Amino acid sequence: MYSEKVMDHFNNPRNVGEIENPSGVGTVGNAKCGDIMRMYLDIDDNQVIRDCKFKTFGCGAAVATSSMATELVKGKTVTEAMDVTNKAVMEALDGLPPVKVHCSLLAEEAIHAALWDYSEKNNVKIEGLEKPVNDISEKEEAPQEEY
């Protein structure tokens, strides 16, 4: 059973789309379920995330976690965005069924992949950020169909 917040973010997702000339883009996927998330970040000169958008190909929980993750990182510094974990996403959504926890992990990984891309493009070190393991940006094209 999904919470009201999960259903709201699935039925009315926030920040869907792309950012033209993004500061960072991260695409991650889960081979088991087929979910693919792409996160776009617009980061200003003070390392504050001005905007965040997403495209997700996947289940309702994947869409909801993507939507919530974008809401949680907007207005934060890149360092503060590192604190947006899968647990924070799940808590903000009032929980997820155990079989859908992987969706919140994908959201966290998408944020980190986009931050990694930003750090690589701008030669910026972000404390605690490591090269994403689940990043598929270079391996394959982004989803052709998305929410």
Image (cartoon, grey):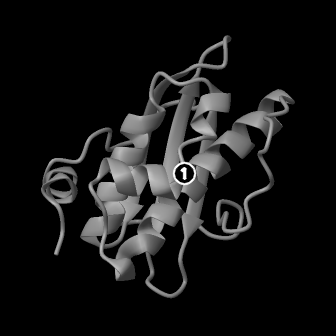
* Up/down of 99 relative to 129, above or below: below
The residue positioned 77% from the left and 46% from the top of the image is 129
* Up/down of 111 relative to 122, above or below: below
Q: Which residue is mark 1?
A: 85
Mark 1 closeness class: few <14, some 14–19, many ≥20 residues within 10 Å: many
In this rendering, position of residue 119 left or right of residue 67: right
Residue 16 quadrant: top left
Q: Is residue 36 visible?
A: yes
Three-letter amino acid code at the position of disc 1: Thr
The residue positioned 65% from the left and 66% from the top of the image is 136
Residue 127 quadrant: top right
The residue positioned 71% from the left and 35% from the top of the image is 118
Quarter containing the C terminus:
bottom left
Q: Position of residue 57 (x, y in %)?
A: 37, 67
Residue 90 quadrant: bottom left
Q: Position of residue 76 (x, y in %)?
A: 53, 25
- Farthest residue, direction bottom: 32
The residue positioned 20% from the left and 57% from the top of the image is 10
Q: Position of residue 96 (x, y in %)?
A: 31, 68
Q: Position of residue 120 (x, y in %)?
A: 81, 39
Q: Is residue 146 visible?
A: no
Front residue of 40/76: it is: 76
Quarter containing the N terminus:
bottom left
Badge 1 marks a residue whose secondary structure is: loop
Front residue of 71/86: it is: 86
In this rendering, position of residue 8 left or right of residue 43: left
